[in-house]
Amino acid sequence: MKSRIQPFLLLFFAFVINTYSQEKVTLSGTIANESNTETLIGVNIYIPEAKVGITTNSYGFYTTTLPKGTYTVIISYVGFDNIEETITLEENTKRNFGMTEVSKTLDEVVIKNNTTKANIRKPEMSTNKLSIATIKKMPAVLGEVDVLKSILQLPGVTNAQEGASGFNVRGGSVDGNLVLLDEAVVYNTSHLFGFFSVFNSDVIKDLKLYKGGIPANFGGRISSVLDIYQKEGNNKEFHVNGGIGIVSSRLLVEGPIVKDKSSFVVAGRGSYAHLFMKLADEPNSAYFYDLNAKFNYKFNDRNNVFVSGYFGNDNLNFNNSFINVYGNKLFNLRWNHIFSDKIFSNASAIYSDYDYQIKVKTVGLNWKSDVKNYNFKYDFKHYFSNNLTLNYGLNSIYYSFNPGTIRPFGEGSAINPDQIAKKYAFENAVYISAEQNLSEKLSLNYGLRYSNFQRLGPQEVYTYANNQPLVFNQEFQIYEEADPTGTINYKKNKKIASFDNLEPRLAIAYSLNNDQSIKASYIRMSQYVHLISNTASATPLDIWAPSDQYLKPEILDQVALGYFHNFKDDKYSLEAETFYKKVKNKSDYIDGADLLGIDAIERVLLNGEARSYGLELMFKKNTGKLTGWVSYTISKAEQRTPGRNENEPGINNGKWYRANYDKLHNLSITGAYAFNPKWSFGGIFTFQSGKAATFPNGKYQYQGITVANYGARNDDSLSAYHHLDVSATYTPKPDKKKGWQGEWNFSIYNLYSRSNAASYSFRQNEDTGLSETRRTSIFGIVPSVTYNFKF
């Protein structure tokens, strides 16, 4: 028996000795833009001898562990020249790389080992990554490219209508989007009715939109995550760039504070069309301004500190009778620490503030409201091996909601000062997730997030008979607000309501070959804060509110299945995804709900559910003089709000009805053409089905007054929304790389002057007595010229 065992033991020990005799070492470092030292996110590093492919993290850091030996390192990133270098590894090695931007004078840019190829194997789906180089190839409307307009050209993403703030993802509402600027929450993403976004493209480095397959480190929203990072500033030399346009202008300054150790970037932007209005004695005005700033200091190879901030404001004034002022304030202090070649950490202390104010002279009202949060997060990325990476961390957010501070406005105002009860909440979460390659063909991303939300005092909370804040009037068959029976006084930090949720995440990718893969994902997410609005799109007057004993947290379950294909050496790529989403605790408003000034939102809400499903297609041309993509989505978004018992009809008699943001068809064609080194052109065509609406289907007389009778909720549609935007950019001296460099941008928004409907109003013609419909549009054709410069 002994003689039989010995050969097996010898083979086993020989295997162990052979395995561990290949002593492994670590190659790590950062990858940055060589010209300005900006770290690059999502750069592909491929080592063919080991068949290892990795990417840089959000701070440009990479690491890989390999047996001692000599390797070829191939680095590729869209918009930059490839790097190919041979490195001999005998010990742990730190190697930083600088990448050179592709020259504009090249007739054709052929990108080997394109980033789209890496995405074939990664278990990442329902995700769109846009570098600022990609965004800047898009048409520059009103003289500047726009981050929000760029993501509206992606499949599954729409806006409610022209002039609407925010965006909708896969049938979700605006408040379901977690929008982050350097990790700080942005509550309102638009300037001037959505015509501009709050993101100055000059200072943006990278963005990533998650529509599904959302990693466990994100939480608190159920539709999407838009993760945006600002530039860090050039730590080698000073530079200035900006643009002067007929509507707005912008300026950015960056440079070193301590060369090679510390840098800053400051960018400002503002509109000034209101000044021309004043010269023309126009009583109305609308303008905005914003400021971005970032500072960083590199203490050593293991410790970096970043301080970033944003301040922006809009001011709308209509003949001094209606004034609306709103804006965001953001601040973030971050510390990056590398514990070892395998453990990277980031700690952040974040402040976000969104405030909005209206003044109405006719009623003498001055209304001010805001939402603030104080956020601490600590994230770790642990590179166990080339086949296993762990992400784990924690997050705590303290919220302060001011629904309304009311003051009199103007002389003779009859408004009495009042303060609607402020609300407070605390949200905590811990998470862990893993990225794992099970084989050359199969990879996984799986994780679990635990979240806890607590509504806290101080606040006086109403109580109601049978705990029902709404009563149903059987005689008139309508819902009415219930009268409170009393109040409960909760002291400071006393728990009013509490919720706990487990949120699992799973994504799988299976590579059919080097150019094709199929992917699947499942996510569960919870949303504890809600935008209180009874309009189809977000407005500056909408109010944010926390979950409580009546306004329950929304719970999302989403599954998705996709097919991905790169062909002709990655010159073209095709993405196809189908998804299904189901949301619990989706509230909707009773007919005739008035939200302005309400201090108990539960008295106009009914609890229900929502669902959406669809197919998304995206075809891209990645290289050559002509680049761009075509995206198409066919989808359905519905809600159902049944009665609380068999005697109540709920909304729409408890049947499924179209959500406010349902759009059956969504088509976008985006193209950029480099005609020659001096001239480049761009165009975007957008078509969307008309948004859901409820129209009157009749009328009746009541005490001499004509009253409209409305049909089923959202049973009608506005007319289809479509327009074409074009731009041309002229660079007089494209070969000039130093000193003053300028370019002219000519653009036309809505080239064929389509009058897209923002709303319909229904009235009785005073002369004929007949009913008539009036369509309201916001924008026609808008030409623009801007001069952009840098030095």
Image: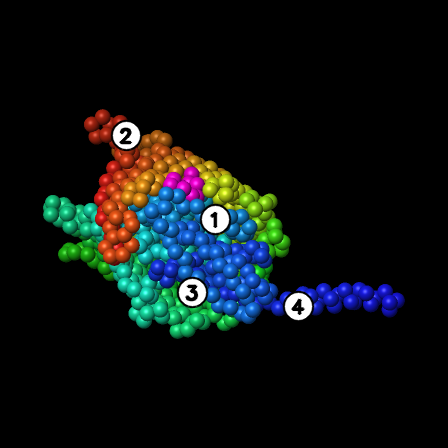
* 279 sits to left or right of 177: left
Q: Is residue 627 magenta?
A: yes
In front of the other: 415 or 702: 415
Mark drawn on residue 397: 3
> Marks 4 and 3, Cα distance to the nearest angstrom?
46 Å
Where residue 728 sits, quadrant-wise, is: top left
Helix, strand or loop for the magenta stretch, by majority: strand
Is the C-beta separation of discs 1 and 3 under 8 Å? no
Precedes in sequence: disc 2 or disc 4:
4
Q: Residue 262: where, in percent of width, then height?
A: 34, 69
Q: Please tell me which residue is depicted at 85% across the width and 65% down the height of the picture.
A: 4
Q: Secondary structure at mark 4?
A: helix
Q: Residue 501: where, in percent of width, then height?
A: 53, 59
Precedes in sequence: disc 1 or disc 4:
4
Q: Secondary structure at mark 3?
A: strand
> Marks 2 and 4, Cα distance to the nearest angstrom?
84 Å
Q: Can you see residue 59?
A: yes
In front of the other: 693 or 429: 429
> Marks 1 and 4, Cα distance to the nearest angstrom?
35 Å
Residue type at tag 2 = Glu
Precedes in sequence: disc 4 or disc 3:
4
Residue type at tag 3 = Ile
In front of the other: 476 or 167: 167
The residue labelled by disc 1 is 112
Precedes in sequence: disc 2 or disc 1:
1
* 6 sits to left or right of 512: right
Q: Please tell me which residue is depicted at 32% across the width and 36% down the height of the picture.
A: 723
The residue labelled by disc 2 is 772
- The magenta-colored residue range is 621-630
Q: Please tell me which residue is depicted at 14% across the width and 56% down the height of the picture.
A: 411
- Kindly report which numbered mark, 2 or 1, lies closer to the viewer in this rendering: 1
